[in-house]
Amino acid sequence: MNFFELAQNRYSERYFDARPVEQEKIDKILEAGRLAPTACNYQPQRIYVIKSEEALKKARTLRVSHYNAPLMLLVCYDAKTAWRNPRDQWYDNYCSGEQDATIVATTMMYEAEELGVHSVWLRGFDSKAVAETFELPEGIVPVMMFSMGYPSDASKANPWHFLRKPLEETVMEL
């Protein structure tokens, strides 16, 4: 499958079965994140693998929608190591950490899809509660979580998922 087919076919999975994701696939997904570009190659991403029953229970208290996936990834960045732009007059000392973590997360999402592991991007959580629940080190900022696993028999994309605005609505030439 080429990249465009992968991007067109991937959708947010909300119906997972209980099968665990094999460690070799988790390792490939994490390696894809390691290879993702970050500002100045500072690599501030911090990825926490959530797969034990205890850790999954904790994660499920932080989000109403977790879809009972057998694996979750918590993608964060280290605010102390993220690149900062001292020349940005709009944002005071702009921090690239959230962008870097998002690039890493997207790269992992597509690698997972290529391996047959479905995912759903989760954000509706309180970052402070996540940091406290998982006792994250100071300066580690939660950005997003993935629920990940294999699709159940009920798996299907929402009909609106495949609707895309025309390029003319989202792209402008300067």
Image (cartoon, helix red, strand yellow):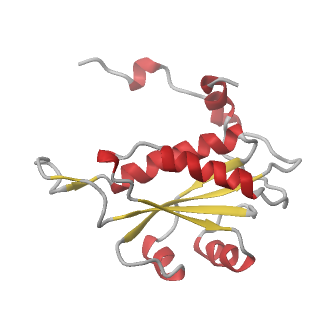
| Image-quadrant location for residue 62 | bottom right
Identify the residue at horizontal 41%, vertical 42% (top origin).
Answer: 37
Identify the residue at horizontal 60%, vertical 29% (top origin).
Answer: 163
For the C terminus, the quadrant is top left
Q: How many labels does the image show?
A: 0
Q: Residue 149 appears at what percent x and percent y?
A: 75, 54
Left or right: residue 29 versus residue 38 is: right
Identify the residue at horizontal 65%, vertical 48% (top origin).
Answer: 28
Q: From the viewer's side, name the closer residue of 11 and 54.
A: 54
Identify the residue at horizontal 53%, vertical 49% (top origin).
Answer: 33
Q: Residue 67 appears at what percent x and percent y?
A: 72, 60
Residue at the outermost right position: 153
Q: From the viewer's side, name the closer residue of 133 and 159.
A: 133
| Image-quadrant location for residue 157 | top right
Q: From the viewer's side, name the closer residue of 2 and 155.
A: 2
**Can you say whether 36 is above or below 62 in the image?**
above
Left or right: residue 80 versus residue 55 is: left
Left or right: residue 43 versus residue 91 is: right
Q: Residue 113 appears at what percent x and percent y?
A: 68, 41
**Can you say whether 164 is above or below 57 in the image?**
above
For the N terminus, the quadrant is top right
Q: Residue 7 appears at what percent x and percent y?
A: 61, 31
Left or right: residue 160 versus residue 40 is: right
Q: From the viewer's side, name the closer residue of 43 and 5.
A: 43
**Can you say whether 44 is above or below 129 in the image?**
above
